Amino acid sequence: MQSFLNLVARRILDNHQSLERVSIVVPTRRAAFFLMQELAKETSEAAISPHIQAVDDFVESICTLEIEDPVHLLFDLYETFREIDPEVQFDRFMGWASVLLNDLDRIDQYLVKADYLFDYLSEANAIARWQATLPEGKTLQSEGGSKQYFSLFENIKLVYHSFRNRLLEKGKAYRGMAYRELAEDVNTLLLERPEFDKLYFAGFNAFTESERSIVSSLVKVGKAEVFWDSDQYYMTVNPGVEAGKSLRDYQKSRLFGEWNWTTDHLLSSQKNITVYGVPNATLQTKVAGQLYQQMKAWDDPENPVPTAIVLADENLLLPMLYSLDETVVDLNVTMGLSMRNSLLYTLVDSIFELQQNAVEFRGKSGKMIRIPKFGHKSINKVLNHPFIRHYEHVMLLPASTGPTIIQKTLWAITRENQVFLSSEELMDLSENHPLFEILFTNWQKNNSRQVISTFYQLIELLRDVYKDYKNALETEYLYLFYTLLKQFEQTIEEKTELITLRTLRSFMFELIRQTKIPFSGEPVSNLQIMGMLETRALDFERIIILSLNEGMLPQAKRQNSLIPYDAAQTVGLPTHQHQEAVMSYHFYRLLQRASEVHILYTSTSDAPGGGEKSRFIQQVEYELTQYNPLIQIENKVVVLESSQQRELEEVVRKDNALLAIIREYLANKGLYPTHLNEFIRCSMQFYLKHIVGVREKEEVEEELGMDKIGTWLHASLERLDQEFFLLEKDPLEEEIKGVMKDEFDRLFKGYVTDLGLNRIYFQIGEHQILAFLKNQMAQVPRRKILAAEQPLNVNINLFLQGIDTPVRIGGKIDRIEQSAEGILYVMDYKTGSVELTGRQKLTDPLKREEVIRKDPDRKMGYVRQLWMYEYLMYRKMRDEQGLSLRETVYNFGDYAVKSGFYSFRDPKNLISNPLELTEGLAPQHFIEKSETILKDILNVMLDPNVPFRKTDDLGTCKFCDFAGICGR
């Protein structure tokens, strides 16, 4: 089927023997290239080419003003605003500056009478209009918020004129201003130009008012001709279709001379259309990639069918490129890739976040200086960025025999729990490496030159790494960012007083948002990937359109403008209805000459429009097919194939190798009370933690947890026992506080205890220890303290599963005391409340041993822990012919051993062990019964028929570090 541009080329060649003084204007640069190709195909002799331009280039070449770059435009607009309202803040201005610029651009593009528009929006006129619609007797107040609202438009009226004058003085313009200048002076600027005999405008749909004025003026004097690409379907047969709205008006007005052309392709040609409902947006690209792979396989390699993949959602460009088969090398991308979607953007963002979130602390010296420090999360985010990690891999790893400076820093932060680090501390960790100097030098307040210099240095550092990097996109982003910085640097030289760090960030990100990588490729490739607007004037036999959802195409009704809908409609500015009509035309024009069409939309409810297919699809299904029976439509639903997964066995069976590892663990590492409790509570947790050796993930904690508080309080009491109570001295309150502060600083360097919750937790811990020791020192009679943090280990042999097995049993007792009656007490500290349960069971001789063997209850675990401590004491006393504590030997059989807890939450009460395994003082009998219980528990541990399995008590899983592994 003959393409539209081929039709244009033939008509122009028929009209002119020489094309030297002919100019052709088309909607896009891509269309200009393809028109040149068509002209070349249709000529058999060498000839001078006509002048072919995209419409923006055409206007800019004729206009006497130079289009200003976005950076200067934003600054000029701000300075204009500041002349009118000196109180305006740059940060707030940046929030709506781009919207205002867009509005000013449209006002000029559509030749709107600006004074009329802003007067229309003035307070008096608006209230008069609103007043007329109110019920009788009701009036409107014009004070308060409405006053402020209307003053905005009064300011914009002044800004509009002042801004244009400022630009005119410099010979500059924004895009709409250039269009307006040409439209209002078309005679001087265009009609009198001698270099063109004839101008052709081809492939347009809905002109702006300035374009309409320019083209109609040229047509009126016979100097221009317009070629339309319209179809009878939406022009005359079904005028309800939005696609023909502007074209029907133009044809009726006869402003553009003879109408060329209207075809009937939509009504007469055969088309196979397949519509695919796809579960999610990105999966569309996979489906499109597979479709194109199949098409390639069916095509004649010598004469493949020209194909376009059209992305209604341009964010799918990268996924689409990755979804194409590796054999697809002949393609052209007619879209820019936004720098906003690049990894470089996320690095720049992370560095700004690092600097903006720096927290100031007082120095430890006598002077009241404040040191800015960076938060660990921001540091982690920067150092783990893919760009920095790639630099580490290329530049740091080969030069390092051990861990790199990045690894050392991240490990130090985690190991020492450093929540905040100063620039100097980070420099020390990196040995003043240039990378860390660039990333972690504190930015001075409002010093934009330092910020830009930082990014220059970073690009310089990364440039060599990415020079030979396979990902050419990211290398291109580095170059683009460099040029953007250069542009930025030149602009702010004169505007230094405007720039704060926050302003700089918002301004730079606005420029990044506007900056795109222009792809360079072979334009005549068989596969073209493009956005909907890039398809203007181009034809493809086969098309694949993605994201054809309601809300995406046409787009949702968003008013991205400061001008209200009713005012825009009154003065002739385009509204969402205009935009829908334009998109409708592009859609139907794509279908006109296509014979094979694949349309994809997202069918799930979280897609734009709630998973509803675009109204354009429904119009084709229910309207177009009524007029053209040659159109075949097939609907398909893409379903993710669910492969039947084999249920994994959620137990770990014990083979000979695993049993050998368990025996080695028992003999060498040894069994501790907490290990025994973990085995009985959840054997899978015990297996993962002690047999496999899976370590808990280390993370930086900003707030003190109960485990940290417990460690601190234990360490403080150990020192107080060693330095005071074991020497039979009582510490003063200040001495207790001093020891606690020293121990906290030793254990937890990174925590900040001067403010926030940590200050409260620190004070609570301090209060608990003071209350506990005050109560201890006030007791009469007082127990004698014999040892603090006393390690006890014994080695025994047990006959387990038919084999003599060495077993090491150990524990660390917080405190050993002796009462006035001579009884030895093993005491354990608890920071939380402690409740012991099951006292009835523990007093029943038939039940108590069974409870110790099997009961997984956490409270029973406390009892089991105290029982193990008593066993260790008796066994140690027997094996070593007496236990030597503070130069006194405590012989086996002469002393009873009891146990209990001190809870810091209830410092006045001693919680004693309710378990009496034997009657009276019978140490040997206690050891024998204890070892019988241990033997029974360990026989289960070594039983090959009893696998390690998850607990049935989900409450146990709530605070388990291995819940993720187990899938709990």
Image (cartoon, helix red, strand yellow):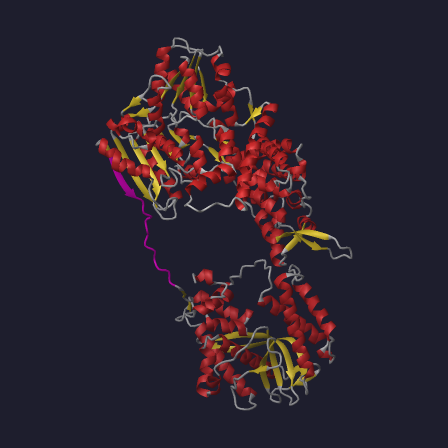
**Rendered view: 232 above or below 549:** above
Where's residue 894, x and y in %? 62, 89
**Rendered view: 103 above or below 686:** above
Q: Is residue 617 left or right of residue 462?
A: left
Residue at 59% across / 85% down in the picture?
A: 897
Residue 868 falls in image quadrant: bottom right
Q: Is residue 74 left or right of residue 338?
A: right
The count of marks equals 0
* 59 within the magenta span: no
Q: Where does the magenta region start and end?
A: 632-649
Along the line of sight, the residue nearer the viewer: 416 or 931: 416
Q: Is residue 545 left or right of residue 145?
A: left
* 640 within the magenta span: yes
Residue that extends furthest to the front in the rendered view of this protein: 137
Where's residue 593, x and y in %? 30, 27
Residue 723 falls in image quadrant: bottom right
Residue at 62% across / 78% down in the picture?
A: 907
Residue that extends furthest to the top in the rendered view of this protein: 17
- Can the viewer see residue 700? yes
Residue that extends furthest to the left in the rendered view of this protein: 629
Magenta span main SS: loop
Quadrant, the C terminus:
bottom left
Along the line of sight, the residue nearer the viewer: 95 or 677: 95
Residue that extends furthest to the right in the rendered view of this protein: 366
Along the line of sight, the residue nearer the viewer: 84 or 302: 84
Along the line of sight, the residue nearer the viewer: 639 or 499: 499
**Rendered view: 777 above or below 224:** below
Quadrant, the N terminus:
top left
- Can the viewer see residue 331? no
Where's residue 734, x and y in %? 74, 72
